[in-house]
Image: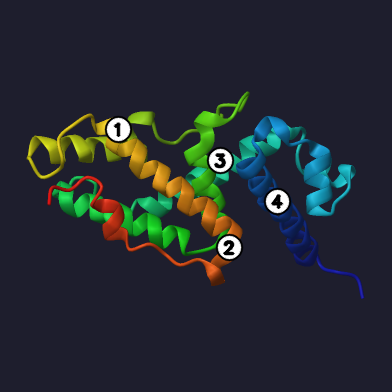
Amino acid sequence: MPRSKEDFKEVSQKRESTILETSLRLFALQGYSAVSIDDITKASKCSHGLFYHYFSSKQDLFDKLMSKVIKQWENDYSVIDFEQNPVFAIRDVSRFLISYLSGKDSNAYILYMFLTFHLQKNIPIPKEKTKSKRQGPFAKLFEIVKRGQEQDLFLQGEPLDYIRVYLACLQGLSYTRIHLGIKKFKPLNPDILANIFLKK
């Protein structure tokens, strides 16, 4: 019995989704410039013809992947009230990030990729950025730390130094989550992360 148009559409969406998910894992761990279309097709178990049915190039794939990932990321972190008391804000950010890592596998790859963007060579700037750098979560983290220091709730010192330690911890946790998987990954108490900033 021939498949309906809906069946074909569902199969097509699954194939495209598989290629996107596979490329996310490869780009996150190996870096954009180190991954070839051949790597993506082999890992996705699809032909080059099928790849080019959905994407015109590696950069087209990356642009579509980043558009999807950025929208998902912004939607997920929109639950955080960044304007509240800095102590509560940094605790909420930490809880969100640990919970995020404890979710789907793709979350760990997304977070790891964002945290290692600055280490990647020749990575294209995403065409679609729905938020400016000043509105992104890491810029908002800086604002929380500055407010916390101004209100004498956070440890004093260069805010970026504390943030670098915080993000390095998250990078290590993301990498651990990727390699251990959800069943073996033991989430960190988010208050330990928040305490990087807080006065005792």
- Residue closest to the eye, 20 or 104: 104
CA distance separating discs 1 and 4: 34 Å
Q: Residues within 10 Å of mark 1 (few under 14, many from 20)?
A: few
Residue appearing at x 62%, y 35% in the figure: 63
Residue 182 percent coordinates (x, y): 54, 67
* Residue type, mark 1 in image: Asp
- Residue hosting label 4: 22
Residue appearing at x 56%, y 40% in the figure: 67
Identify the mark nearer the N-term, 3 or 1. 3
Say what secondary structure mark 4 lies in.
Answer: helix
Residue appearing at x 28%, y 38% in the figure: 162
- Residue hosting label 3: 67
- Residue hosting label 1: 161
Q: Does 131 sit left or right of 141 as displayed?
A: right
CA distance separating discs 2 and 3: 27 Å
Q: Nearer the viewer, mark 2 or mark 3?
A: 2
Identify the mark nearer the N-term, 4 or 3. 4
Q: Nearer the viewer, mark 4 or mark 3?
A: 4
Say what secondary structure mark 2 lies in.
Answer: helix
